Amino acid sequence: MSLTAKVKHEIASVNPGTTQARAAQVSSLLRFSGGLQVISRRYIVEAEVEGEQVALRLARELAALFGVRPRVSRVAGMSEADLFVVRVLEEGETLARQTGLMDARRQIVRGLPNRLTLGKADVLAAVWRGAFLAAGTLTDPGRSASLDVATPNHETAMALVGAAGRLDIEAKAREVRGVHRVVLREPEAIHRMLEAIGATEVLAEWEAIRQRRETRATANRLVNFDDANLRRSAQAAVAACARVERAFEILGEEVPEHLRYAGELRLAHRDASLDELGTQADPPMTKDAVAGRIRRLLALADRAAADQGIPGTEANLPSDHDLD
């Protein structure tokens, strides 16, 4: 089961609390899942929702709160989603006014009623819960993680953004290919919204997935960092060995003994770090002492090469080596 389906399954059984919050959830669900139809001069309220659980919950709430008798039927078709339609054929106009789909002048309301978007926290959460049940989507945590709701129009999108803002949750309205959506992308915002609408079990699962992925990403970054350091160290060791060999060629027998010892130590342990070379020395030396002797050996050889007019210690470096 997808995370979206899990959220809808969980929040379909959440009790909004007060009668006002219950009514707000029903109004929101109707707004985002359908609306008004006019058939033979008669207003019909209908909502198309995913899952029998959501459909039956909506039908029960419509009957309990507004005294209407909804009809529930399954949508026939090839869609993978289990779709149901909840219809109210009688007293549709009255229900439309009660739920805010229509105003007192019999005008269709394009957004959401102010009494919903300016309500208390439980009403605002109920509005978002109904919207998600109708048209919400939750994706896995990651770079493209999002919680979003498809909305009928721009006005509804802005009303839903405002409701989220009053819950102190940042949401943004987007229009993609002619479809208006309200989107939450920040992990903290998604966390708070799932918590607000009552999807606590899915929230725990979502956070666990997020934690695993962040841990894996951090481990991968550290591995890549270590690999880069190892590559640089190996490249530096190859370059040092090539320059030491060339220094011995240039200086021949004229190499001071203490510098020769450091150079031979470098050639004998080609993959070792300067710290490791120091421990191999007899008596042991510090990293700085080893580096200093090798540096003086190369400088002495380069001066001798310049005096003789021959290539210096860099002549033996691989052609693709970057001195920087």
Image (spheres, rainbow, N blue to C red):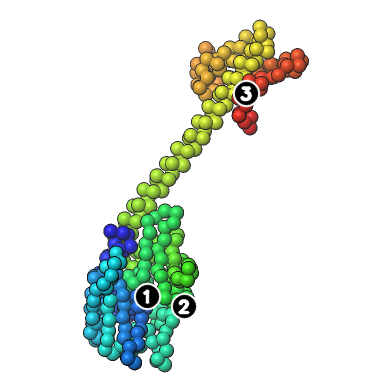
Q: Is residue 260 above or below residue 4?
A: above
Q: Residue at x 46, y 66 (%)?
A: 170
Mark 1 and mark 2: Cα distance apart in space: 12 Å
Residue matched to label 3? 317
Q: Specify the quadrant of the image occupied by residue 306.
A: top right
Q: Earlier in the sequence, mark 3 or mark 1?
A: 1
Label 3 sits on a secondary structure element that is loop
Mark 3 and mark 1: Cα distance apart in space: 69 Å
Residue matched to label 1? 32
Q: Is residue 61 above or below residue 200?
A: below
* Residue 158 placement (x, y as % from top left): 47, 74
Is the Cβ of the residue at disc 1 closer than 8 Å to that at disc 2? no
Which labelled disc corresponds to residue 257? none
Quadrant where the N terminus lies? bottom left
Mark 2 surroundings: few (<14), some (14-19) or many (≥20) residues within 10 A: some
Q: Earlier in the sequence, mark 1 or mark 2?
A: 1
- Which of 191 and 8 lies nearest the eye of the viewer? 8
Label 2 sits on a secondary structure element that is helix
Q: Residue at x 38, y 52 (%)?
A: 210
Report whether 54 appears left or right of 236.
left
* Residue 181 placement (x, y as % from top left): 44, 69
- Which of 278 and 234 lies nearest the eye of the viewer? 234
Quadrant where the C terminus lies? top right
Q: Earlier in the sequence, mark 2 or mark 3?
A: 2
